[in-house]
Image (spheres, rainbow, N blue to C red):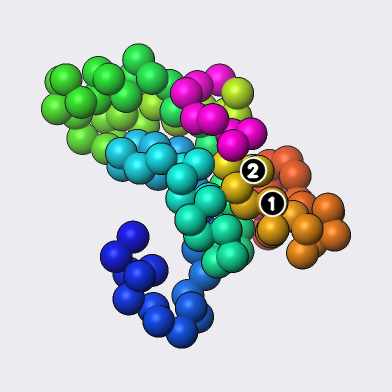
Amino acid sequence: MRFMELDRQRAVKLLLDTGHATFGGADPVALAKKYRNRIAHVHCKDVRKDVLARHASEDWSFLDAVVEGCFTVPGDGMVELPGVLQGAARLFRLAGGRGRAGPRRPTR
C-alpha cells in the first residue's frame, strides 16, 4: 500500500477486493479501517483457507489457486467480511445506505 501513502493529496481511491487482499497476505479488515475515507468500491469475495494453504505449501501459481477454487462467495471462507464492511461503512453512508448488492450482470 506504499502507493496510497505516496499520494499526499489523497486523490487516489481504493477498490478494496477482500479476496485478493487476503490472497496477497494483507488483512482486509485493517485495510478497510486504515483507508476507509479513500475506499470507492468494495468487492466482497471470500477465500478458502485450505486451498490457500495448499497454494503456499505446494508453490502453486495464482492461476492454479483460482482453478482449484481458492476464491469463493462471501461467507464460504476465511475473510471476516462484517469487519471489512464496518471498516468501510463511510462508503455506505455516502451512498445513503443504498450500496449496490448482488452479482454484476454482464452488459451487451
Q: Nearer the viewer, residue 31 or 20?
A: 31
Instruction: Tell me where residue 48 appears, x and y as whole percent.
Output: 43, 21
- Please, is residue 90 above or below residue 18 in the view? below
Q: Where 27 sits versus 107, above or below?
A: above
For the point 85% across and 59% down, the residue is: 96
- Left or right: 64 in relation to 10: left
Q: Nearer the viewer, residue 18 or 37?
A: 37
Q: Residue at x 52, y 70 (%)?
A: 13
- Label 1 secondary element: helix
Can you see residue 20?
no
Residue under pointer 2:
85
The three-letter amino acid code for the residue at tag 1 is Ala
What are the residue bounds of the magenta stretch? 76-83
Residue type at mark 2: give it.
Leu
Whether residues under marks 1 and 2 lie with C-beta atoms below 8 angstroms apart, the answer is yes
**In front: 99, or 73?**
99
Whether residue 106 is visible, yes or no, is: yes
Mark 2 element type: helix
Magenta span: chief secondary structure: loop
Residue topped by disc 1:
89
Residue at horizontal 69 percent and vertical 59 percent from the top: 91
The quarter holding residue 37 reads bottom right
Q: Is residue 50 magenta?
A: no
Location of residue 61 in the rendering, given as x and y in whole percent from the top left corner: 21, 35
Q: Residue furthest bottom?
A: 9
The quadrant of the picture occupied by the N terminus is bottom left
